[in-house]
Amino acid sequence: MNIRPDHGPSRLAAIRPDAVTGTRGAGLGDAVFSVLRQALRQGIFQPGDRLREEEIAEHFSVSRTPVRDALRRMLERRLLEVSGGRGLMIRRLDRAEVFELYQMREIMEGTAARFAAENATGAEIALLTDLQAAFEGTADVAECARLNKKFHEAIAGSVRNRFFHSPLEELQDFLALLGATTFSVSGRAGPAAAEHRRILDAIAAHDPDAAELAARDHIRSALATRLKMLNAD
């Protein structure tokens, strides 16, 4: 496995210093946790990056107490790990965890597509159609990853089940621990676009069975690509 250089602290520059103090309706500990969690999801932090309490506190102009609380919560959620003498680092998932994560992702994404096919409005289908067109129209890896995330978020947004979103949120946290996007693998974007189109067509046709099957197949294809990436390390 390739070991990333320890560049975690420098990545703080990508986060607005006022992001924490500008958060309303939350205590400082909650705000720091929310900002760090979002940075992880956005790929600002990557597996192997070290998070230093003092540098985070300095960057956001807060005391160490809320930062310590936020890092404790991330550690409890298994988003961080203690790495002998080097403090807290963004976790790396082992191969077994990757398989388990994709198993759950297949179930969750399949369920989301099924519910979307049952409940999506015309406006929500139009949004998915626009995202699909944008995805098919770009060759940029980062933009593919961003639009892919938006596409799946739009499907989840049409689920209409209040018990669905909490476990999906937790799943999204662990997906961030996978590191580099599968779209960094040459030739992945084209098949992914076709897989998205199949999901979209099933949702637009309000066919739950076809939508779930298409979404499950899509995640299996993503796993196959992820395994290629792991084998190349």
Image (tube, rainbow, N blue to C red):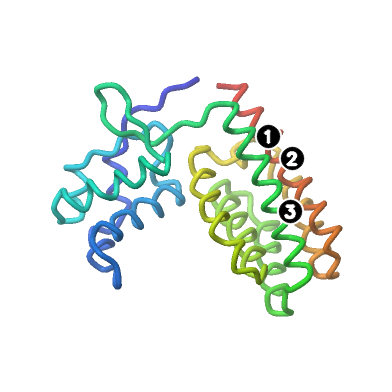
Q: Residue at x 83, y 70 (%)?
A: 206
The residue that mark 1 highlights is 225
Q: How far is the residue under mark 3 from the one under mark 1? A: 19 Å
Measured as percent of width and height from the top left, residue 194 is found at 79, 52
Provide the residue designation for mark 2.
221
Picture residue at 49% right of the left edge, 44% below the top: 176
**Badge 3 element:** helix
Whole-Å distance between the Cαs marked 3 and 2?
Answer: 13 Å
The reply to whether discs 3 and 2 touch (Cβ–Cβ < 8 Å) is no
Nearer mark to the viewer, of 3 and 1: 3
Viewer-side residue, 185 vs 47 = 47
Using a 10 Å C-alpha cutoff, classify the residue at mark 2 as few (fewer than 14 neighbours), some (14 to 19) or many (20 or more): some
Instruction: Kindly indicate whether the residue at mark 1 contacts the one at mark 3 (C-beta within 8 angstroms).
Output: no
The tag on residue 152 is none
Image position, residue 113 (x, y; %): 74, 60
> The residue tagged with tag 1: helix, strand or loop?
helix
Other residues around mark 1 within 10 Å, as few (<14) / some (14–19) / many (≥20): many
Residue identified by numbered label 3: 110
Can you name the residue that lies furthest to the front here?
Answer: 163
Residue under the point 28% across and 62% down:
19
Q: Amino acid at mark 3?
A: Gly
Q: Are marks 1 and 2 in contact (CB under 8 Å)?
A: yes
